[in-house]
Image: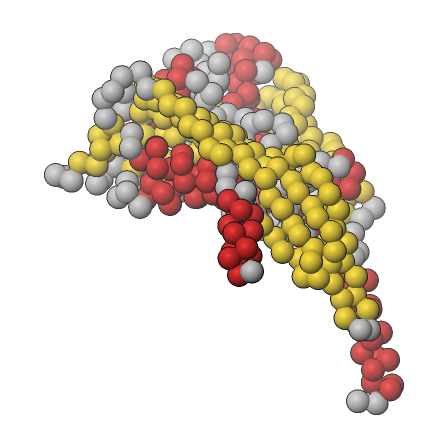
Amino acid sequence: MSKTKIIILSLALTVLFISGCSSSAQVQIDSQFPTVVSKPKPVNAAIVFSEEFTNYIASPNSKTSIDLGSAQTKLLSNAFAGLFSQIEFVSAATDVTFDNALVITPSVQEVQVSTPSDTYLNVYEVWIKYSLDIQTSKGDQVDSWFMPAYGKTPDSFMLSKTNAIEEATVIALRDAGAKLLLDFYRIPSVYNWLVTEQIPHKNSKRGSHSE
Amino acid sequence: MNRLLALGALILLAGCGATTTIDEYRPNNQMMDINSEQSVVILGRRDAGHYDTDREFIDCVASKMEGADIGVFPEQQFVDAIYPWFEPRTAPKGLKRLRRLMEDSAIKEKIERNGIRYLVWLDGSTETHDKGGSISCAIGPGGGGCFGFAQWEKSSIYEAIVWDLTNLTEKGRLRVDSSGTSYLLGVVAPIPLLTPVKNDACASLGTQLKQFFTVDQSQ
């Protein structure tokens, strides 16, 4: 092998080696989520998934981006379907067709990521902070509910940064679904709206699964 | 000389054995019947902040149970089948909450349809501590090698709690505590002398756990 070829090969190997040490991560969440086991209440609801929400790409820091839009839309569609018997998904509040319904607009307030190099812990962690703007179909504000979700990897052993952040994000999204189903009907203002609208709520076990 | 070497190797290997203790608690001596159409699900606790019960350990215990002809329902499949009621945030920590969960006909129906009779919660972790010594390796044009000595201690502490999903009662508890020291000798080549602490904990827990069950072959 000629000297030039050896130099080119060495340079190529060095570039490959150094690029392997790069700490940036572009994460695409493609996971499927299980269907929720839940008996919906006889409540009509319209869920507003704005274009910004369905195409949301989080940038928790300059070196990390997480394409969350499609996965969070799938996950929340599934979770909301477990809460309401009649549901419609629209892209703007003006498209709602229900007369007497809750109109819920989810949005992402913040996404945070922590890596072992940040925390000296042996795990990758992801926090997603959602906000649910809850109104009636007449336009009256019911609440603006802050819904945090958290996910972490079991450890960081043999995980690439991209795979680890993806795994932690999927766990955080599943946690968001769990939080929504567990706590939505416990929001005092939502509970009061159910009472006002005379929607049966006391006989249902939903929301009473936790101690 | 050969005998001396063999004796030395034997002493070193004997030093690599794990010490394992199992504590068992059962409210009564009744065996737990399980037929061929029923299965056990082994779930790891994942709600602690600083550790997760690792899936590798759960798979290991599950494989020990399967070896005794006890049907084991895969953990992730179970968690997905009744999503979101066994997520870290929502999983029942006690029987009171399990009973409340099972009042939901949709959840009960899913569990019954999958033939899950018993639920085993596994909670614990394996940790490394008391690291000591040092070993260094070098490589040069004339060759390379390692020199030195390192040692570390590992301890595995796991607890298993068995719930009967038909009677909604606790059937027993097992706690395994395993520890041992591993060594790495650097004598030109690195020679690892590893103590299989986690494997030992898994084997002991799996063996003890399968003795809880009586497989009814009549069905």
Q: Is residue B28 above or below residue B21?
A: above
- State how the image is colored: secondary structure
Residue B105 place in picture, x, y as percent: 32, 25
Q: Is residue B110 above or below residue A166?
A: above
Residue B189 place in picture, x, y as percent: 67, 61
Image side of residue A105 versus residue A100, left or right = right
Q: Residue at x 56, y 51 (%)?
A: B8
- Which quarter of the rendered picture does the C terminus of chain B lie within? top left
Extreme-left residue of the structure: B218
Residue A140 place in picture, x, y as percent: 65, 18
The answer to whether residue B111 is visible is: no
Front residue (pair A43, A61): A61
Image side of residue A94 versus residue A191, left or right = right
Q: Is residue B205 above or below residue A199?
A: below
Q: Residue at x 65, y 50 (%)?
A: B184
Quadrant hosting residue B188: bottom right
The answer to whether residue B48 is visible is: yes
How many badges with numbers are in the image?
0
Residue A161 place in picture, x, y as percent: 70, 49
Q: Residue at x 63, y 22 (%)?
A: A135
Front residue (pair B131, B187): B187
Quadrant hosting residue B145: bottom right
Image side of residue B157 versus residue B110, left or right = right
Front residue (pair B15, A43): B15
Q: Residue at x 79, y 89 (%)?
A: A1
Front residue (pair B148, A67): B148
- Which quarter of the rendered picture does the N terminus of chain B lie within? bottom right
Extreme-front residue of the structure: B1
